[in-house]
Amino acid sequence: MAENRSTKRLFQGKTVFLGIIVELGVVVVLVFSGIIVSWLVTW
Amino acid sequence: MRQRKLKLDILLIFYYAALIIMGLGATMLVPAVVALGFREWNTALDFVIAILLSFLTGNIFLLFVPQEIRKLKLSWLHGMVAVTVAWFVGMIIGAVPYYLSGFYGSFLDAAFDVMSGLTTTGLTLVQDLDHVPYGINMWRHLLTFIGGQGVVVLALSFLFRDISGAFKLYVGEAKEEQILPNTRNTARVIWIISVIYLFVGTVVFWLIGMVIGLSPLRAFFHGLWVFMAAWSTGGFAPQSQNIMYYHSVLYELACFFFITVGSFNFALHYNVFRGNYREVWRNMEIITFFTTFSLLFLVVACGLAKLGVYTGFSEVFRKGFFHVLSAHTGTGFMTIYSSQFHGWSELAISGLLVAMLLGGSACSTAGGFKALRVGIIWHTLLREVKRLISPESAIIAEKFHHIRDVLLEERHVRGAMLTVLLYIVTFVITAIIGTACGFPLYDAAFEAASATANVGLSIGVTTPAMPAVLKVVYIFVMWAGRLEFMAVLAGVAFIFEAVRRR
């Protein structure tokens, strides 16, 4: 029971929202690196 | 005595396999309801037949298992073989609504698509996809979504209450990292994270769908399905042109995000969602993925620019980046036709092939070698080089960061090397079989990498007209690759052992 209760309280809205933003940041950096590589090879 | 032990093993394996199969059968209620909502009566009936069949099969299995055996503790062998049996029988039952729908040329084609969905591969043999009913499309994408998280993870979250040895079932499905001490709670965490992203992703794709001119209802279902395929790094799409159908940069950008985060380790998501944001930039898997992705995209971009396949910067980025990311995360989304890969240079295709084999993160929805293993092999190489240049008496310790600082041990190296070796051997054998079936070596190798690493990019080999033997081989390698070989090898060893004991 105690473990089930702790599972329910695992995440808070704020940290989840910021977590998604941080993960989005990773993808943005990846995309920018892709843009730079594309620009370099076609330059 | 030995006969009795064998019988006990079989009964215990069938008990857990039966529960997982019935759990999978229960999930067919979702596409059945969707079919009813769209007044697709025949499709709804197909699902009702399949649900009844799954419960009938499960109960027949259970009929032979006495109560006292159900309480026995699972061994590693039981866990591994139960998962293998459940996936195989699940494939057959899951194929029933596909086959009854009339959109598949044979039952083998339908079974191929179920295994492709469950293993999040994305290769498909469906015919006339653009006119497939909503119910069938729901089942295709739901299978991918369930397969990404894991059928066992689903069963552990919602079906089993207290079972001893749950971790062995969990590991059997190639998810060796326990996020929480309790396996059932770990399975629940995986589902909570997936459902959070399911909500976010469906809304994002839904809005973009409406912006690009789809009706709200159609945009919603396309958004839901594309998200399910993206997050599970599955590669299915509701239209035969895959993501190219939408002709939308916004849709492609959303795909970039969801396929990338879909390939991240669930332990990483858990830490980030708990507020440990720095983990993203310190984690060895992310660093390895970034490095290999950047190098391979450079190779592919050079290959594309060299032949002048795409002349402008935006085309190289939009086509090249999309497909390298799709390959490296093991997704298989495409924005070109399969035949257009033949126009890409050999350098670009080689880059894609390696990206497919490398795959995403461990304990994620992605397939392939996994960034964790690639990172471990890299650190092993570093350790050996350091050892060579150090005095003989020096003790060389190599560390890597994955959720916490971990000292590189021989068991890490052995595990990583063994799995990578099995992937390479399977890939080479599958490519040779493809060549023996009459396909050019390059095409056979590309498709073999795609099937083995559960990617789903196709150069045109996977069609309903391909030889039946190749369909069977691809089903097997998708299955073995998704379960990371050990569960399937345990199943094969168990059969041999059973025969030997008789």
Image (cartoon, coloured by chain):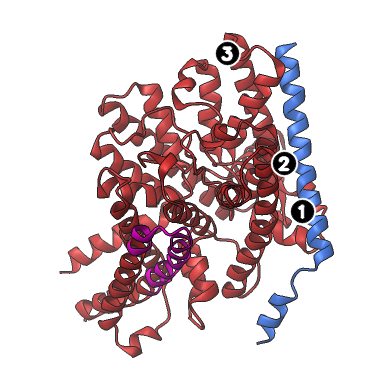
Chain colours: A blue, B red
Q: How many marks?
A: 3
Chain ID at mark 3: B
Distance Cα–Cα, label 2 vs label 3: 30 Å
Position of B84 with respect to B157 (left or right) is left
Distance Cα–Cα, label 1 vs label 2: 18 Å
Say which of marks 1 and 2 sits in front.
1
Q: Residue at x 48, y 65 (%)?
A: B30
Q: Is residue B388 visible?
A: no
Q: Magenta region, mostly helix, strand or loop?
A: helix
Distance Cα–Cα, label 3 vs label 1: 36 Å
Q: Residue at x 52, y 15 (%)?
A: B345
Counting from the top left corner in percent of width and height, residue B495 is at 25, 62
Chain ID at mark 2: B
Residue assigned mark 3:
B309
Assign a secondary structure to mark 2: helix
- Vertical relation: B338 (above or below) A42: below
Counting from the top left corner in percent of width and height, residue B501 is at 19, 69
Residue assigned mark 1:
A20
Counting from the top left corner in percent of width and height, residue B148 is at 53, 55
Say which of marks 2 and 3 sits in front.
3
Q: Are marks 2 and 3 on the same chain?
A: yes
What is the span of residues highlighted in magenta in the rendered image? B19-45
Position of B118 with respect to B335 (left or right) is left
Counting from the top left corner in percent of width and height, residue B310 is at 61, 15
